[in-house]
Amino acid sequence: MREKQNNWQRIEAVIKWANMSTNYFARHIGLARGENLYQIKRGNNGISLDVADRIVAKFPQVDKLWLLTGEGQMFADERTRGPQIPFYDVDVEHGLEHLEHLEPQSNLILPPVGPCDLAMSYTGRAMGALVPPGTVVLLKAVDRDAIIPGGEYAIVSRKIVTLRIVRAADEEDKVRLVAGDRENYDDILLNVSDIVAVYKVKGKLIINS
């Protein structure tokens, strides 16, 4: 039983380091549901080679031998501490609409900032000092129902792709997209039904200010 418990402790260590929930982690490594991992947690299964390969494919800094056996150290390179986030070297307002056709140029390795799906540059000026041109934004795909008014989001709609502060509108079933620089950029009123995809801004690397 102790060996089974150690199996889960190693999986749990990776999940906590990646700052993900168990279910999100399962989906992130390509498992249809978290039940595979919960079976390991309950001690019913060990860590299969398939699960180890899936984890290392997403987190190559994790040592596969340690993951399978507990021997050695968690990180293949102890200097590498952050999860890898795919970085697309394109402007967020131009790239998100064509994301399925893009390949990341590199991976950003950062201290855990919460689950992130990708990183892109922001070269626009509408967000003013909140998101200066040249900022790298860390994005997490969310349901449009999960939008929290006042938060910063990249919105993909049928008409526009833009990064704005999302606020409630007076009209039902609409949202207001507000620029950081309101002196020079007007609000955009958008039908919620026109929204195709939503990405929450989880973090910002302000390189040029």
Image: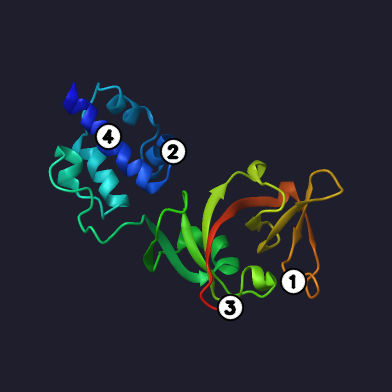
Q: CA distance from mark 1 to mark 4?
A: 47 Å
Q: Nearer the viewer, mark 3 or mark 2?
A: 3
Q: Secondary structure at mark 1?
A: loop
- Which numbered circle lies on residue 9? 4
Q: Would residue 105 be found to the left or right of residue 153 on screen?
A: left
Closest to the observer: 173 or 200?
A: 200
User: Looking at the rendering, which quadrant does residue 133 occupy?
Assistant: bottom right
Disc 4 packing (10 Å; few <14; some 14–19; many ≥20): some
Please tell me which residue is depicted at 71% across the width and 55% down the height of the picture.
166
Q: Pointer 2: what residue?
A: 21
Q: Nearer the viewer, mark 1 or mark 3?
A: 3
Disc 2 packing (10 Å; few <14; some 14–19; many ≥20): some
Disc 3 packing (10 Å; few <14; some 14–19; many ≥20): few
Q: CA distance from mark 3 to mark 2?
A: 34 Å
Indicate the position of residue 172 as horizontal and vertical percent values.
Answer: 83, 43
- Which numbered circle lies on residue 68? none
Q: Secondary structure at mark 3?
A: loop
Kind of residue indicated by mark 2: Ser
- Which numbered circle lies on residue 209? 3
Kind of residue indicated by mark 4: Gln
Q: Would residue 103 be found to the left or right of residue 61 on screen?
A: right
Kind of residue indicated by mark 1: Asp
Please tell me which residue is depicted at 48% across the width and 62% down the height of the picture.
119
N-term-proximal mark, 3 vs 4 = 4
- Which numbered circle lies on residue 181? 1
Q: CA distance from mark 1 to mark 3?
A: 14 Å
Q: Quadrant of the C terminus?
A: bottom right
